[in-house]
Image (cartoon, rainbow, N blue to C red):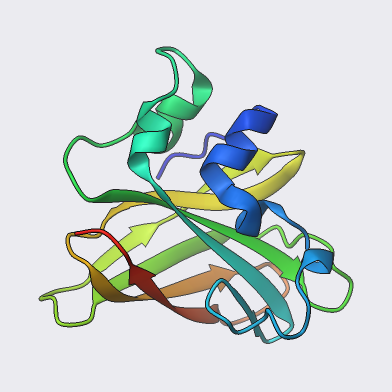
Amino acid sequence: MSRDTSEWSRRAVIALAGAVAATGPGAASAQDVGRGNAKVVDGVLAYLGVVPAEIVRGFPRGHPEGAMHGGVPRGRHLCHLVLALFDAITGERIEANRVSVAVAGIGHVGMTRLDLDPMTIADTVTWGAFVRLPGRGLYDLTFSVWVADRTAAIVLPFRYAHPAG
């Protein structure tokens, strides 16, 4: 697993994390939490962003965003997952020790497990990885987050409706 935490540009925050993952907890009302892109579990507020990998491929050669997670994989149906973690009460960022995801397409065969890499965005850590989502439909994205002050992983299940095939 790569541990590149180089500083990224403001453009990268917008392009890679999207408005959902880059915004702080104050941007979400109580009604927003649980609508798919945000979730609170065990006092952790998590925002999920899913961005087409083509956006990352569009960065100029040598740009740091093009090299994150070991570079953008080749192939079709690739997305960049981004997970931002906050304390649900204080709104402070949570700096996890490790984050992984299990990806299962509903009606698709198999499951993919990935470790996410830390990414420093706007002086805070956000987590990301590239994943192949081969078809239109629903995907279960189950994130496991390990933090220093807890004995067990925090499990954050999301259901993502993938629009493209």
From this view, report whether residue 40 is shown above or below residue 146.
Answer: below
Q: Nearer the viewer, residue 34 or 123?
A: 34
Considering only vertical position in the picture, is 164 above or below 75?
Answer: below
- For the N terminus, the quadrant is top left
Picture quadrant where residue 100 is located: bottom left
The residue at 75%/38% (across/down) is 122
What residue is drawn where x is 42% and y is 26%? 66
Q: Residue furthest right?
A: 90
Residue 141 is situated, as x and y percent measured from the top left of the image, at: 39, 73
Give how far across and how far down residue 126 sits, in percent: 62, 51
Question: At which x and y percent is residue 107?
Answer: 15, 82
Residue 108 can be seen, yes or no: yes
Q: Is 53 situated left or right of 126 in this image?
A: left
- In the picture as drawn, the residue positioned furthest to the left comes out as 109
Identify the residue at image location x=61%, y=66%: 47
Q: Which quarter of the figure has residue 140? A: bottom left
**Of the pair 46 and 15, the residue shown nearer to us:** 15
Query: Camera-side residue: 155 or 160?
Result: 160
Residue 7 visible from this viewpoint: no
**In the image: residue 127, left or right of residue 105:** right
Expressed as whole percent of the image width and height from the top left, the position of residue 65 reads 49, 28
| Residue 4 sits above or below residue 44 on the image | above
12 in relation to 132, above or below:
above
Q: Look at the image and tell me in which quarter the C terminus lies.
A: bottom left
Residue situated furthest front in the rendering: 163
Q: How many marks?
A: 0
Is 114 left or right of 124, judged from the image as shown? Answer: left
